[in-house]
Image (cartoon, rainbow, N blue to C red):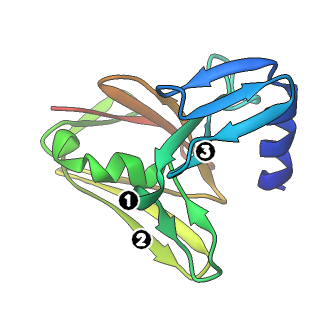
Amino acid sequence: MKTILLIFLLILTASAYCQDTTLLVRANKTKIKDGYVPYVVGSNKIKGYAIEIRSCPLDEGVILENGRRIAGLSCIVTDKSQYVGGTLTFKKKETEILDMKVQTVGNEVRFVVTGKDFNMELTLSNGAILKMEDDVTTFFTKGKGIWSIAKK
């Protein structure tokens, strides 16, 4: 279903440049620069978080047991030194980020942020990256809500 959504989004996009033109979509033709894998950020169900298509270097992606390549979460963890010591925020509560990791569990990916006072996590089946800004990345976890991590 997520693959169908991605294809649908790529077809509807008339002209978009994403992350230094590593992903180029024009006139219903998609070209991904060699060495990159696309991923979707945002939601069409949560107001204020428009869908964007981004790309991540191929060597920073996570490969699942079924051979599926996952990007996005792994790009954040690649730069985890920028976030460790930063702030994890959930429901107006803040804590210091102690660690972040992406774990593969069979054909699923689990993203875990460990904080000093509380932790947050998501999987591809229960959550999403909503927004990636220079210093803050915002997530959604079904059953919990919206949360964010900020660089130190």
Left of 54 or right of it: where is 15? right
Residue 39: which numbered mark, if any?
3
Q: Nearer the viewer, mark 2 or mark 1?
A: 2
Residue 103: which numbered mark, if any?
2
Give above or below for 152 relative to 85: above
Residue type of the residue flagged with mark 1: Val
**Residue 119: where, in percent of width, then height?**
32, 54
Q: Foreground residue, 117 or 140?
A: 140
Q: Foreground residue, 77 or 92?
A: 77
Q: CA distance from mark 2 to mark 3?
A: 18 Å
Residue type of the residue flagged with mark 3: Tyr
Q: Quadrant of the N terminus?
A: bottom right
| Residue sitting at x 53%, y 35% | 22
| Residue sitting at x 40%, y 23% | 133
Q: Earlier in the sequence, mark 2 or mark 3?
A: 3
Left of 118 or right of it: where is 69? right
**Residue 58: where, in percent of width, then height?**
48, 56
Determine the image quadrant of residue 45. Answer: top right
Residue type of the residue flagged with mark 2: Gln
Counting other residues with Cα less than 10 Å from the Cα at mark 1, is it few (<14), some (14-19), or many (20 or more)? some
Question: Would you say residue 96 is visible in this rendering?
Answer: no
Q: Tell me the SS state at disc 1.
A: strand
- The residue carrying mark 1 is 112
| Residue sitting at x 50%, y 39% | 139
Give above or below for 23 relative to 124: above
Q: Quadrant of the C terminus?
A: top left
Are dots 2 and 1 in contact, CB under 8 Å? yes
Q: CA distance from mark 2 to mark 1?
A: 8 Å
Counting other residues with Cα less than 10 Å from the Cα at mark 2, is it few (<14), some (14-19), or many (20 or more)? some
**Residue 129: where, in percent of width, then height?**
54, 40
Residue 36: which numbered mark, if any?
none
Q: Earlier in the sequence, mark 3 or mark 1?
A: 3
